Image (spheres, grey):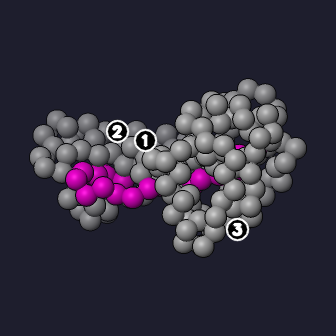
């Protein structure tokens, strides 16, 4: 699960942090990092609250005393991309690579400065410990995700050493 803020009712194993990127039409894209203040002044297409990406952005804007220029709220990524392609505005997504999307009308994802992140964690009930089998699956899945992320070198991903933080974040 991708989270902006950890809910205390879950035990979690944080896996990685995914940076958020500005996605906009190729004609508007500069292909360079964008400052949060500049992002706030751009026409933005964002998911409505509650949404993890929206929550992280709202928190970052509030911390910087900024009010974003939200021109459209859309809750399906495919529809967000359609609106970006139509030139309605830009959007912010936890994706630093758009190579799997058809067409050449989207600019390169632009990193936001200062960085805004979502954390990807494996979560389970905070009220009951994992069985031995479930813990083995968690550990196997953690190794799989780590290997995959290191092999693909996904842009904006920062691996978290789950073994070091597991005892701090499990509740």
* Horizontal side of residue 169 vs 97, given as left or right: left
Residue that appears at 25% across and 58% down? 8
Q: Secondary structure at mark 1?
A: helix
Query: Which circle marks residue 141 in the picture?
Result: 2
Magenta stretch, overall SS: strand
Give the foreground label among 3 and 2: 3
Say if the magenta span includes residue 132.
no
Q: Can you tell which quarter of the image residue 139 is in?
A: top left
What's the CA distance linking mark 1 and mark 3? 34 Å
Residues in magenta, as a range: 4-24
Say if the magenta span includes residue 6.
yes
Q: Please state the horizontal and vertical placement of residue 37, each as a whole percent of the image.
A: 70, 68
What's the CA distance linking mark 3 and mark 2? 38 Å
In the figure, 105 relative to 18: above or below?
Answer: above
* Horizontal side of residue 4 vs 136, given as left or right: right
Label pair 2/1, CB-CB below 8 angstroms: yes
Q: Assign the C terminus to one quadrant of the image.
A: bottom left
């Amino acid at each position: 699960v991708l989270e902006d803020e950890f809910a205390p009712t879950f035990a979690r194993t944080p896996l990685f942090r995914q940076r958020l990127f500005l996605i906009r039409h190729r004609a508007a894209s500069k292909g360079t990092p964008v400052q949060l203040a500049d992002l706030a002044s751009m026409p933005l297409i964002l998911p409505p609250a509650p949404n993890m990406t929206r929550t992280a952005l709202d928190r970052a804007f509030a911390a910087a005393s900024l009010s974003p220029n939200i021109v459209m709220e859309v809750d399906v990524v495919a529809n967000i991309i359609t609106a970006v392609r139509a030139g309605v505005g830009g959007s912010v997504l936890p994706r630093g690579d758009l190579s799997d999307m058809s067409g050449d009308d989207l600019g390169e994802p632009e990193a936001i400065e200062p960085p805004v992140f979502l954390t990807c964690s494996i979560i389970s009930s905070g009220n009951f410990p994992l069985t031995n089998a479930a813990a083995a699956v968690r550990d196997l899945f953690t190794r799989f995700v780590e290997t995959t992320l290191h092999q693909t070198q996904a842009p904006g991903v920062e691996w978290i050493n789950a073994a070091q933080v597991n005892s701090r974040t499990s509740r």
